[in-house]
Image: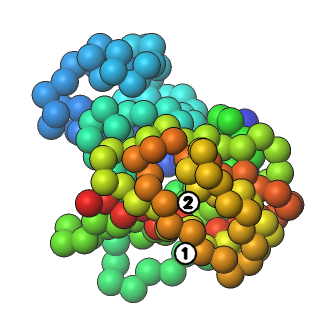
Amino acid sequence: MSDIDPALKPPLEMISASLRAERVRAGLSLTEVARRAGLAKSTLSQLESGVGNPSLETLWALCVVLEIPFSRLLAASQPRVRVIRAGEGPAVGSAQSDYRATLLAASPPAARRDVYGIDAEPGPQRSSDPHPAGVVEHVVISAGRALVGTADEPVELHPGDYICYPGDVPHVFQALEPGTRAVLISEHH
């Protein structure tokens, strides 16, 4: 993420407070969460202290261990009407590829879905480990082209194309054109 505009880096203060609160809520030690997520204890300690530059993959691994939706790390209470301009909002980049996810809407208490804006550039594909059981992802391409879906059956999508696939199996997103943009909805069952 070192090439990401500083304004698009993840909001570390919000992430660190959320990680600490969720770890305590789960009754897990720093050592145990780090072990289960495959991270060094010092890395998790730094993240909880608001230091570091976490990748999307690191944060997803922690969410899986803590059994929370990814949006819980980035979402603060929201006003009734909310506008997020293109290029703004809490964004987290991938360590694997030029891929950035921006939380657009966190699931309210009565619903179980989160909405993300995706910006991606051609290069290595972003491979996602399985999310918790029952997660379904919906993607609509708004610009460019991308290879999206389960790791064993990705589909090439063009602007306006939609795909729905299980998020609880390995899945991928690979931009095939510069300036690829998409909306991803992560549905938790």
Q: Is residue 110 above or below residue 165?
A: below
Residues packed near mark 2 inside 10 Å, few (<14), some (14 to 19) or many (20 plus)? many
* Kind of residue at badge 1: Ile
* Kind of residue at badge 2: Thr
Q: Nearer the viewer, residue 180 or 166?
A: 166
Q: Position of residue 90 (x, y in %)?
A: 52, 57
Quarter placement of the N terminus:
top right
Q: Picture quarter containing residue 180?
A: bottom right
Q: Can residue 81 be seen at all in this image of the molecule?
A: yes
Q: Is residue 139 above or below residue 2?
A: below
Q: Position of residue 115 (x, y in %)?
A: 46, 68
User: What secondary structure is found at the residue carrying circle 2?
Assistant: strand
Q: Is residue 172 above or below residue 89?
A: above
Mark identifier at residue 84: 1
- Seen at 54% across and 29% down, the residue is 52
User: What secondary structure is found at the residue carrying circle 1?
Assistant: loop
Residue at which label 2 appears: 102
